[in-house]
Image: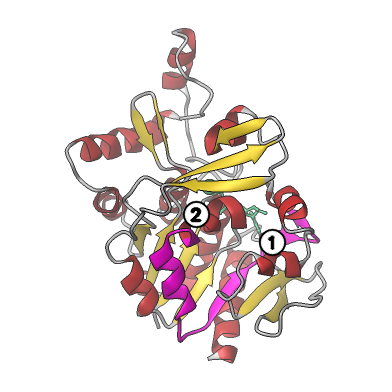
């Protein structure tokens, strides 16, 4: 069975760790968000792709919740001492990946090819594809002004409320090689418990990706990133409250109109008034350990099986 997963960073990576024990890696394709990518200190950083790489390679720091285990910060301390850009947290081990990726990009290798090489070197068996090789960047409109995603998220600690989200480059962005194929050829499509506006939204903003999902002939199951109407981490709940009018499963489902057939929600959320085309699946969605991750992935596959 072939599973294709649209994924953000941390929430997506946690879910994918579960999926990779339930389904053979060869049968998992991942379409990752690149609209959080940034150029900093002369390096190209792809935070969401890296969260997935580290999660699946067993290199993630589970306690901190992002970045690599056994990380150190010597290079960043030097950057700070020299008055350089130190607001974006880059650890020493993490930097090694950015150095190698940036060199490949400078030599003319595409982001999708660079990602494939890094994934292979880290021993991944899943296929990890950036949504696009073209420049695609999220901007948020807030009462304090419009900010590039990482300026708002990291530098400003995502404290500003968000009135609207823009995906610069989306109209021209083409799916990376293989992306449409892995959607068309999947037996099951999954949207990870990720931020619908800033992680999944940019992937769906690429026209050909949205069209491929719209014409699907297999079930697409989304997993909610909310538990009891609250994001486990980050601003998804505040963004939904302001831009979708609430944090209910129905509010989340409105972000994926016409694109999903089931929505997996937590026992703490009532499956109120979902559109008739979206089946609610109620289960435990907190991925606090390996068993919880595995169980959630299995629940998603069971939900897809019940729809097929
Ligand atoms: P980012 O790109 O690193 O911000 O990560 P994602 O967008 O992929 O994931 C962020 C979302 O993951 C947040 O909205 C969290 O609420 C959600 N999340 C994190 N851990 C869990 C979990 O254990 N269960 C569920 N249901 N959602 C989670
Ligand atoms: Ca992200």
Q: Residue furthest top?
A: 82
Q: Residues within 10 Å of mark 1 (few under 14, many from 20)?
A: some
Seen at 33% across and 64% down, the residue is: 125
The vertical placement of 191 against 153, above or below, is below
Q: Choose mark 2 or mark 1, whichever is in front.
A: 2
* Picture disc at residue 286: 1
Residue in front for this viewpoint, 14 or 34 = 34
Q: Is-magenta flag for residue 150?
A: no
Foreground of the two, 70 or 273: 273
Return the residue found at the far left.
107
| In this rendering, position of residue 198 left or right of residue 186 | right
The x and y percentages for residue 138 are 51, 44
**Secondary structure beneath disc 1?**
loop
Residue 26 visible, this angle? no
Q: Is mark 1 within 8 Å of ligand 1?
A: yes
- SS at circle 2: helix
């Amino acid at each position: 069975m072939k599973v294709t997963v649209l994924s953000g960073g941390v929430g997506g990576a946690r879910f994918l760790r579960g999926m990779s024990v339930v389904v053979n890696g060869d049968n998992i394709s991942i379409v990752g968000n690149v609209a959080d990518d940034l150029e900093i200190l002369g390096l190209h950083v792809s935070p969401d792709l890296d969260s997935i790489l580290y999660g699946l390679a067993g290199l993630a720091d589970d306690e901190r919740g992002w970045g690599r285990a056994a990380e150190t910060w010597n290079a960043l301390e030097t950057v700070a001492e020299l008055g350089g850009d130190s607001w974006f947290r880059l650890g020493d081990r993490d930097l090694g990946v950015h150095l190698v990726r940036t060199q490949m990009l400078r030599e003319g290798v595409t982001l999708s090819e660079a990602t494939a090489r890094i994934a292979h070197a880290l021993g991944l068996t899943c296929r990890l594809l950036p949504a696009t090789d073209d420049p695609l960047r999220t901007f948020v409109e807030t009462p304090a002004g419009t900010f590039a995603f990482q300026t708002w998220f990291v530098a400003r600690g995502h404290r500003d409320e968000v009135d609207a989200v823009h995906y610069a480059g989306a109209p021209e962005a083409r799916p990376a090689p293989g992306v449409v194929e892995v959607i068309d050829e999947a037996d099951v499509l999954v949207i990870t418990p990720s931020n619908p506006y800033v992680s999944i939204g940019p992937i769906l903003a690429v026209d050909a990706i949205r069209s491929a999902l719209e014409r699907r002939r297999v079930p697409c199951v989304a997993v909610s990133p909310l538990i009891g109407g609250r994001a486990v981490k980050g601003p998804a709940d505040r963004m939904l409250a302001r831009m979708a009018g609430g944090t209910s499963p129905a509010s989340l489902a409105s972000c994926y109109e016409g694109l999903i057939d089931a929505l997996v929600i937590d026992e703490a959320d009532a499956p109120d008034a979902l559109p008739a085309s979206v089946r609610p699946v109620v289960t435990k969605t907190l991925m606090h350990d390996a068993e919880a991750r595995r169980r959630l992935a299995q629940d998603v596959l069971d939900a897809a099986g019940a729809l097929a």
